[in-house]
Amino acid sequence: MLRILIYALLMHLLLTSCEPLPEDAQVRHFVVRKGEHYSKPRYVETLQARKLVFEATFDETAIYAFDDYYQDSNNKLLGFSDCNSEHHENSARFGWMWLNDRLEIHAYCYANGVRNTQFIGIATLNEPGRYEIEIKDSEYVFRFNDNPPVAMKRGDTCDRGVYYMLWPYFGGSMPAPHDVHVAIRVLH
Amino acid sequence: MKAIVIATNFFLFSLVASGQNMVVQTQSEWTVAGIQHGFSVGYETRSSWGLGVYYQAELEKENEENITRDDFRGVYLQAPVVKADKLAFFALLRAGLANNNFVAIAPGLETRVHISRRLGTAFGMGLRMGCASVSGRLFVKMF
């Protein structure tokens, strides 16, 4: 009996006395390879709360130049598809584009199959920005750093179901012109 | 009422007679989003396969806007991996709803240590919200 109690105590100490992970260890480094749209590594995860909060850091690889026709298309940063919906039907994501020599951040949504986008703010290269999407009954509220929040219409969808996560994606129709890196730390 | 009592007795006696158990557990889980506490009630076969329901929630926390509390409820399936006299390893799959609306699946592994025939403790590691979680449990085999 004593041996078992000692073992239980040791297991408890082993499993609960670890130091918290350093912040760097919780950062996921995504890369979209030249000529591709999807980022790697690929994850399969679902949203589990009414708020998605994360930090993202872009570096100089976010700078690119296309013909004018393609330059202002949104690349996708992070978000989720809404309840049991395919993401071109109902979803909410942050979009980004390199335009006019600055990194623009946009709210990017589908509501009942209709796409809506709205400019939110400017991101600084090599500095983490704080991003947040909150799900409300009939709208999504996007927050980015200290910029004014942006509310976007939410489609007529269910409340209870699967909300799958949408990871970084380059495009638009144009694939990445070179390797594009972004570091993301999901906070909640 | 009589029928319910008889059916319940029949069920409990059948558990005792066949070496199966009702297991009640209290649990705490350290997730990337905070610590959740809760309980589970399940049915365990003689070969240690288990099926049950669970509920766990954070203590209330206050943010800048309101008071929130994350929770996670659903069903679990437990499969024995290795068993010894006082020690056992299990694979655990939990599936349910997080915060009432979000379907979530959480796989994990658990080490169970029997303190006595009916009482024990367990330590687990799992995957919650895309990150590792650590859990601790106390369990009682009721019948």
Image (tube, coloured by chain):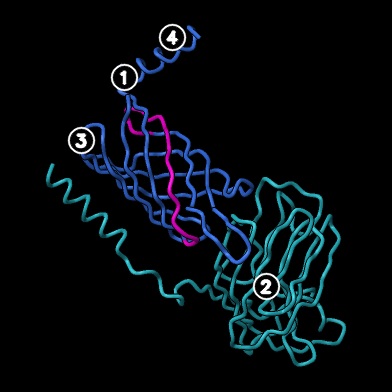
Tags 3 and 1 on a common chain: yes
Q: CA distance from mark 4 to mark 3?
A: 30 Å
Q: Assess disc 1: are there few (<14), some (14-19) or many (≥20) residues with their C-alpha within 10 Å of its C-alpha.
A: few
Q: Are marks 1 and 2 in contact (CB under 8 Å)?
A: no
Mark 2 against mark 3, which lies toward the viewer? 3
The image quadrant of residue A123 is: bottom right
Mark 1 against mark 2, which lies toward the viewer? 1
Q: Circle 3 sits on which residue?
A: B116
Q: Which label's residue is closer to the chain start, 3 or 1?
A: 1
Mark 4 against mark 2, which lies toward the viewer? 4
Amino acid at dot 4: Ile
Say above or below: B35 vs B55: below
Q: Position of residue A9 (x, y in %)?
A: 21, 53
Chain painted cyan: A
The image quadrant of residue A44 is: bottom right
Q: Circle 1 sits on which residue?
A: B16
Residue visible at 65% across and 88% down in the picture: A124
SS class of the residue under badge 1? Answer: helix
Q: Name the tint of chain B in the rendering.
A: blue
What stretch of residues is rendered in magenta? B32-49
Amino acid at dot 2: Leu
SS class of the residue under badge 2? Answer: strand
